[in-house]
Amino acid sequence: MTNPFVKTVVEGAKRANAKPVVKKTPISKDVLKACCEKYATCNELPIRRNISVALLLFAGFFRFSELAGLTLKDITISDSHLNIQVTRSKTDQYRKGDEVVIIRSGKVTCPVVNLERYMLLANINTSKASSDYLFKLLVKVRSGFKLIEKVKPLSYTRARESVVGLLKEFVPDTARYCNSLHSFRAGGATAAANAQVPDRCWKHHGRWRSDSAKDGYVEDSIDNRLLVSQSLGI
């Protein structure tokens, strides 16, 4: 087995019999739209939380850890858009913080409108800056559900179980779409890339379309920065 030829044959046999890697298919805006349309009039807190999580992962290209770490003081909602301050990110190696802006589209899939509906049902006070987490576990009470009082973020395991479970009926192949929350981030980034958004607009929470775009970036107007989320079609 020390012979180089034998080693090569063994390694080739291993690769030939290995299970092929099946990449997850990014979630599409059509899947999100179908889900939002079905639950358009639903005011159940678990449903509204899960929809809001899915839309923000898609529109902000968030990793789940970034979304789970958001506190109430990190978000600002205006008539035109949602502003999210991400204080710590995997792409923010120098811990300078970063900012995501998401346009208010007015559609049934609008991330801003759906976040407002979730916050209203959860009795979250938007006028009071707080270090409490935006998304948390829910507990069953007599009147329905409410957020847990403990200052603790929503876990990945619970979020995946809830969000994936909600969307399974709207995807053609659950094995390829809904085993990971990464499908939502990948779906948003794919939609923006296909829309051919100009390089200068890609400073969207550290998501650079190319190294040249990153190197040449200068602070842009809010209208240009909103082009990224506007291009997603949700």
Image (cartoon, rainbow, N blue to C red):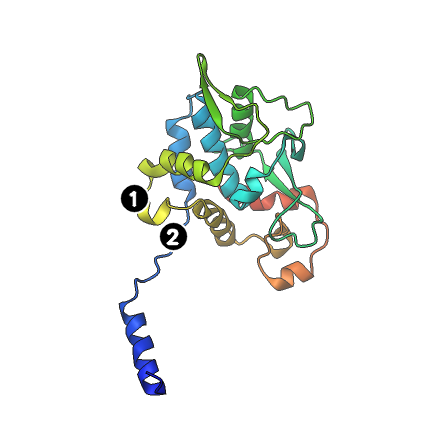
Q: Is residue 40 rendered to the left or right of residue 56?
A: left
Q: Circle 1 — which element? A: loop
Can residue 234 be spotted in the picture? no
Q: Of residues 222 and 73, which is closer to you in this image? A: 73
Q: Quadrant of residue 81?
A: top right
Can residue 96 be spotted in the picture? yes
At x 31%, y 36%, the residue is 169
Q: Which residue corresponds to mark 2?
A: 24
Q: Residues within 10 Å of mark 2 (few under 14, many from 20)?
A: some
Q: Residues within 10 Å of mark 1 (few under 14, many from 20)?
A: few
Identity, as a three-letter code, of the amino acid under mark 1: Pro
- Relative to 60, does residue 211 appear above or below in the rendering? below
Q: Estimate the x, y position of residue 13 in percent, counting from the top left.
A: 28, 74
Q: Is residue 125 rendered to the left or right of residue 2?
A: right
Q: Of residues 234 and 96, which is closer to you in this image? A: 96
Q: Which residue corresponds to mark 1?
A: 172
Identity, as a three-letter code, of the amino acid under mark 2: Lys
Q: Circle 2 — which element? A: loop
| Image quadrant where one finds the N terminus | bottom left
- Relative to 20, does residue 35 appear above or below in the rendering? above
At x 33%, y 86%, the residue is 5
